[in-house]
Image: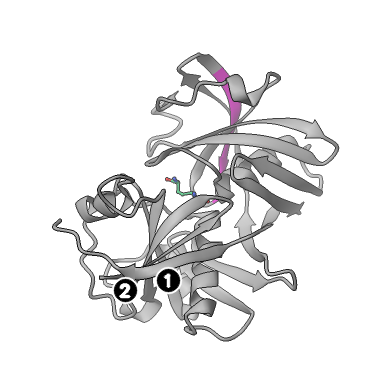
Amino acid sequence: MRFAKGHGTENDFVILPDPDGTLELTPERVAALCDRRAGIGADGVLRVVRTKALGEPLAEEARSAENCEWFMDYRNADGSVAEMCGNGVRVFARYLLSSGLVAADSFGVGTRSGARHVRIEPNGDVTVDMGNVTMFGEGTARLADGPVQGLRISVGNPHLACRVDRPLAGIDLTTQPSLDAGEFPQGANVEVFRESGPGVLEMRVYERGAGETRSCGTGIVAAAAAATPEGQSATWRVRVPGGECTVVLESGRAWLSGPAVIVAEGDVHLSS
Ligand SMILES: N[C@@H](CCC[C@H](N)C(=O)O)C(=O)O
C-alpha cells in the first residue's frame, strides 16, 4: 500500500492515497499503521479519496463537500472516526499540491464536518477556513492531577478548552481525562491553555482517540475562542509543544494558519 507521512506542528499523519475509494480501512488497520513501534507511527490517518467515490453515507453538512474534488477521510490513531482535523486538513492540502492532484493554491476540501477552504500563503504556510466556532457553556474534565473547568466548544468536532493559571508543563496529561457523558456523548478533545503574553497563548492537548499530541488544529482554535471575550474579533499566536499556529477569529468564524509538510513517501506492508 502506498503511503506518505506528513505533519503540521508535529501533529503527524499517515496519508493514504485512495482516489477511487477501494481501500478497506478497518479500525485495526488504522491502529496498526499509527503504531509507533510496529507500524509507521502517527496521531491519525488521512485517506485521500475523491468525494464522488465515497462509499459511506455522508452527514447532511458534509454534502456541501460534493463541490470539493477531494475528501479527507480522517481517522484517529485508535481507529475511531473524527469529524474534522485542523492540522490534518492543512497537511492534506499540502499533499494534494505536492503530489500534483491539485494545481491551484486555493481550493476546497471535503470533510465530515462540511467543506473547508484552504489557501497556500506566500511563505508556504497553509491557512484553512475552519468555519463557525460554537460555544456551549461550561464543562469540567477530571485530569490525573485533579479537575479543570473549561468551555465546551465545537469546531466541527468536540472540545473542552480549559484556561489554567499554572505552568502547563506541570499538568499530568498521561491518562485520558474523564468527562461528563451527558455533556460529551461522543467524548471530546481536552485543551489546557494560558495566556503567555499579549496575543499569545500556550496550549497542550489530550486528543480523543490519540492521547496527548504535540499539536491539534481544532484544539488551537477552541483555545483561541475560549480566550476571546464573547462577540469580539481577535488574532492569537498559539504555541504548542510542536510549534506555533495563528488563529484569526471574526464574527464567530476562525481561520487557522501554520506550517504543513510532507516528510516521506513509500510502501507499507502490514498483515492486518
Ligand atoms: N489533530 C486534529 C484533531 C483530530 C481529531 C480529534 N482527535 C477528534 O477525535 O475529534 C486537529 O488538528 O484538529
What amino acid is labelled 1 in the image?
A: Phe
Q: Quadrant of residue 22?
A: bottom left
Q: Position of residue 237 (x, y in %)?
A: 75, 46
Label 2 residue SS: loop
Q: Is residue 252 visible?
A: no
Q: Which residues are magenta?
A: 148-155
Residue 5: say if magenta. no
Residue 150: say if magenta. yes
Q: Earlier in the sequence, mark 2 or mark 1?
A: 2
The residue carrying mark 2 is 54
**Of the numbered discs in the image, which one, if any, rests on residue 50?**
none
Task: Kindly identify the residue that appears in the image at 71 percent across and 71 percent down.
Answer: 121
Marks 2 and 1, how far apart in space?
8 Å
Crowding at mark 2 (Cα within 10 Å: few <14, some 14-19, many 20+): some
What amino acid is labelled 2 in the image?
A: Leu
**Of the numbered discs in the image, which one, if any, rests on residue 71?**
1
Task: Kindly identify the residue that appears in the image at 49 percent across and 64 percent down.
Answer: 263
* Residue contact at pointers 2 and 1, CB within 8 angstroms: yes
Task: Kindly identify the residue that appears in the image at 59 percent across and 78 percent down.
Answer: 107
Crowding at mark 1 (Cα within 10 Å: few <14, some 14-19, many 20+): many
- Most common SS among magenta residues: strand
| Quadrant of the rendering where the C terminus is positioned | bottom left
